[in-house]
Amino acid sequence: MKAEEPIKPEIQAKFMTYPAEAQTQLNAVRCLILAVAQENGLAAVEETLKWGEASYPVKGGNTIRLGWKRRDPDSIKVFFHCQTSLTETFRVIYRDEFEYEAKRAIIVPLDAPIK
């Protein structure tokens, strides 16, 4: 899947259940995931629903999931498998950019710029 490919209908339908601000952030992170994979020559990224959330697995890599939760309405979360070091790596590189949820997720405020 290339960064410019349209969002799959089931992912779009899921995103539409979230507030507009969350949809904007989720779409921005989705585009970033696809662009980074493409720029780095990674295998095709699949776009699917897993555990009720937008999921982006790549062959030979770990799945990234995106979600918004009512109990945390001012942010979205980028989830990684908790047995990887991905969250810790982000914590080292982007120490002041985000908040983190243990080894599980990056917390992205709805008003944060996505670069």
Image (cartoon, helix red, strand yellow):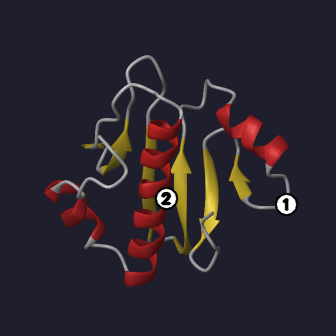
Q: Residues within 10 Å of mark 2 (few under 14, many from 20)?
A: some
Secondary structure beneath dot 2 equals helix
> Furthest-left residue in view?
9
Q: Disc 2 residue type? A: Val
Residue 39, given in percent of the width and then of the height, sits at 51, 39
Question: Which residue shows up at 34% across the image and 74% down it?
Answer: 18
- Residue 29 badge: 2
Residue 53, given in percent of the width and then of the height, sits at 34, 51
Question: Which residue shows up at 50% across the image and 54% down it?
Answer: 32
Is 82 positioned to the left or the right of 21 in the image? right
Residue 109, given in percent of the width and then of the height, sits at 62, 72
Say which label, 1 or 2, has the lower sequence index.
2
Q: CA distance from mark 1 to mark 2?
A: 18 Å
Q: Are marks 1 and 2 in contact (CB under 8 Å)?
A: no
Secondary structure beneath dot 1 equals loop
Is 97 positioned to the left or the right of 6 in the image? right
> Furthest-top residue in view?
60
Q: Is residue 41 above or below residue 39?
A: above
Q: Is residue 11 above or below residue 91?
A: below
Q: Closest to the observer: 59 or 37?
A: 37
Dividing the image into 4 quarters, which one contains the N terminus?
top left
Q: Which residue is mark 1?
A: 96
Question: Which residue shows up at 44% across the image and 33% down it?
Answer: 63
Question: Which residue shows up at 69% across the image and 28% down it?
Answer: 85
Dividing the image into 4 quarters, which one contains the C terminus?
bottom right
Q: Quadrant of residue 91?
A: top right
Is 98 positioned to the left or the right of 84 in the image? right
Q: Quadrant of residue 57?
A: top left
Q: Residues within 10 Å of mark 1 (few under 14, many from 20)?
A: few
Residue 106, given in percent of the width and then of the height, sits at 64, 52
The mark lying in front, picked from 1 and 2, is 2
Q: Disc 1 residue type? A: Asp
